[in-house]
Amino acid sequence: MPPVDRNNPVRAKSSDSRISFMEFMREFPDDAACLDYLWRTRYAEDGENAECPKCEQVRPFKRYETKQRRQSWTCTACGHHIHPTAGTIFHKSSTSLHLWFYAIYLVSSSRCGIAAKQLEREVGVNYKTALRMLHLIRQELMEQDYQGPLSGEVEADETWVGGKEHEGAKRKRRSENPDGVKYGRYVKSRPMVFGMVQRGGQIRA
Ligand SMILES: [Zn+2]
């Protein structure tokens, strides 16, 4: 067997879920990163300019620190506030956004489903909260995965969702990763987390 090239790590099949978790933590290291992700994917791609519903045009927004635990962005022209979690399953939840994202990661990366009891242990919330989270993730996020293709807002790389992959995305993925093995579940679980969070972002109350 050739020695391991440390500069070009190859993911072993047995360790891929662990690596996926590392990937997850790199993308979403904390609550602020999760909020920023929602802000960018739902409202402001560049993190600053968003369509203000009050001004009815694109305006620069500034981050606004509120006394509430979750922050909003404010239109610099009219003062209108946008809360990136509004209308999502995360809104008004007392559970941290980071824990929500982690729960989505766990649900989407488990091969044979996850029990509320396991979510309770892993995420560190009480059983009632774990049940509620699991229900919302399954009913509100995963349910939609079976209802057809994603909207145009979602980038091609992020459209992989349990069993529903566009032919174009599939070809693209294969051409980028022809052997399909090296990266293990990274190829599946990471985009799925993004995809599901994206779905979360699109849910309106
Ligand atoms: Zn405005």
Image: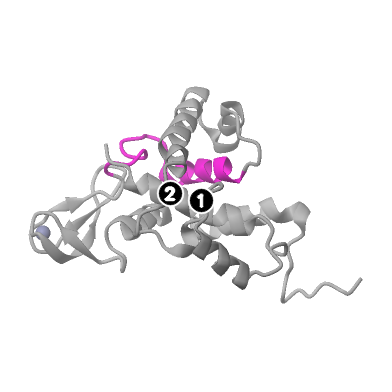
Task: Determine the residue located farthest toward the front in the rendered image.
Answer: 167
Whole-number angstrom distance, CA of label 2 to CA of label 1: 6 Å
Tell me if 16 is positioned left or right of 24 in this view: right
Check disc 2 and report the residue beneath it: 197
Q: Find residue 57 and report its image quarter.
A: bottom left
Instruction: Report the disc number at residue 193.
Output: 1
Q: Secondary structure at mark 2?
A: helix
Q: Nearer the viewer, residue 129 or 42?
A: 42
Task: Determine the residue located farthest toward the right in the rendered image.
Answer: 1
Queried on whether the Cβ of the residue with tag 1 lies below 8 angstroms from ligand 1, the answer reads no
Q: Is residue 102 magenta?
A: yes
Type of the residue with mark 1: Val
Type of the residue with mark 2: Val
Instruction: Report the disc number at residue 76.
Output: none
Task: Kindly indicate whether the residue at mark 1 contacts the one at mark 2 (C-beta within 8 angstroms).
Answer: yes
Q: Quadrant of ligand 1?
A: bottom left
- Magenta residues span 86-109
Task: Determine the residue located farthest toward the top in the rendered image.
Answer: 128
Q: Secondary structure at mark 1?
A: helix
Identity of the residue drawn at 11% across and 56% down? 79
Quarter of the image with the C terminus is: top left
